[in-house]
């Protein structure tokens, strides 16, 4: 059993990294990994400056705006949401890449490997590239955009615990979406990005979910990303995380408990979803099918 899991996970992680990184030379890959997150976060920085009514500065944000806890709260939420697109949407893309672009999924199905574990391995590569983007975004925020973040005051055990728990949950969600796309013939590529974009609105990444209409707020409270981002912010900002008091009534232990329960729930859903959609795809002959564009 352990041999099968190892045989499924390690080659998948290596393959995923090769797919993500060897499309160009190392210098171009590094430049791409630097420029993409910085360009993305610049949009947020300038939006905050305009909304806050501050004057333009060399760093792209005024000293008063950059020093505010709200600015840090928004910046970190946007930065760590990169993982949602990288891990959750990335896990679903792995299935489509293997089925449609490389046409190897049918061979994986007859190989002596565990497919869900293989997908976890592919998600690891997305996690690595996502981590590079997150680190660059945080460094740019501290060095150039005056994000009031002190690494010395960071609660590291809480940070890494929340990060890993959230990444596992995102991986489970990615497997659910990915196996669902196995059963879709028309335009399956948009599903992962559409899910990540929709959850961005409801997770409180850049604004408190209490701003949403009352009938939409329960969606935000049901999402694991809401509690995951709150824990990340509390670990990095400490008291500054109280800028948006949406979850102020919850202790750190309660937030961890909610996130752990949701991770377990999505893990169980992923198991049953994979079995169901896998059976449907087999019955309809979709394992080696190509979708219509």
Image: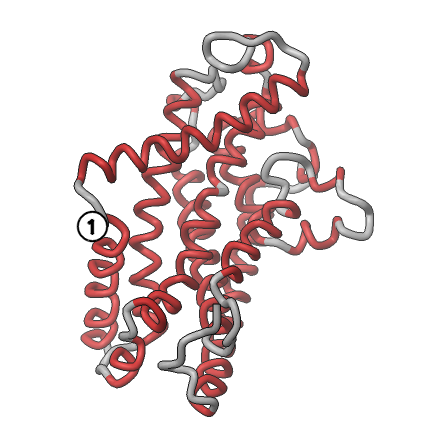
Instruction: Name the image quarter holding residue 206.
Output: top right
Compared to residue 213, the image places residue 183 above or below, namely below
Secondary structure of the residue carrying numbered label 1: loop
The structure residue drawn at horizontal position 50% and vertical position 83%, both measured from the top left corner, is 276
Query: Residue at image x 54%, y 52%?
Result: 196
> Viewed as shown, does residue 126 lie left or right of 45?
left
Closer to us: 235 or 229: 229
Position of 287 relative to 208 (above/below): below
Residue 114's spot in the image, x, y percent? 30, 77
Q: Which residue is mark 1?
A: 22
In the image as oriented, which residue stretches furthest toward the right? 214
Q: Quadrant of the N terminus?
A: bottom left
Residue at left offset 44%, top offset 39%: 158
Rendered image coloring scheme: secondary structure
The residue lying furthest to the bottom in this view is 283
> Taking 255 as reference, is 156 left or right?
left
Q: Position of residue 233 (x, y in %)?
A: 52, 34
Q: For this view, does 9 lie left or right of residue 194?
A: left
| In the image, residue 2 above or below residue 189 | below
Q: Position of residue 84 (x, y in %)?
A: 48, 49
Q: How many marks?
A: 1
246 and 183: which is toward the camera? 183
């Amino acid at each position: 059993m352990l041999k099968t899991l190892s045989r499924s996970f390690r080659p998948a992680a290596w393959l995923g990294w090769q797919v993500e990184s060897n499309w160009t030379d190392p210098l171009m890959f590094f430049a791409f990994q630097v420029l993409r997150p910085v360009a993305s976060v610049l949009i947020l920085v300038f939006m905050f400056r305009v909304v806050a009514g501050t004057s333009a500065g060399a760093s792209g944000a005024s000293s008063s705006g950059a020093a505010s806890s709200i600015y840090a709260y928004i910046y970190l939420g946007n930065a760590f949401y990169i993982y949602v697109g990288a891990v959750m949407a990335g896990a679903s893309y792995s299935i489509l890449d293997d089925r449609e672009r490389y046409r190897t999924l049918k061979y994986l199905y007859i190989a002596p490997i565990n497919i869900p574990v293989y997908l976890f391995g592919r998600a690891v590569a997305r996690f690595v590239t996502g981590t590079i983007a997150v680190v660059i975004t945080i460094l740019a925020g501290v060095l150039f955009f005056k994000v009031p973040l002190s690494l010395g005051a960071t609660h590291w055990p809480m940070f890494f615990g929340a990060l890993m728990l959230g990444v596992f949950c995102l991986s489970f969600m990615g497997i659910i979406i990915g196996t669902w796309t196995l059963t879709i013939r028309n335009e399956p590529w948009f599903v992962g990005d559409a899910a990540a974009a929709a959850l961005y609105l409801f997770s409180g990444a850049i604004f408190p979910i209490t701003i949403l209409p009352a009938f939409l707020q329960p969606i935000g409270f049901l999402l694991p990303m809401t509690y995951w981002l709150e824990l990340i912010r509390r670990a990095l900002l400490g008291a500054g995380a109280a800028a948006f008091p949406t979850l102020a009534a919850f202790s750190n232990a309660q937030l961890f408990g909610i996130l752990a329960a949701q991770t377990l729930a999505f893990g169980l859903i992923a198991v049953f979803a994979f079995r169901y959609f896998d059976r449907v795809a087999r019955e309809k002959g979709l394992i080696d099918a190509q979708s219509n564009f």
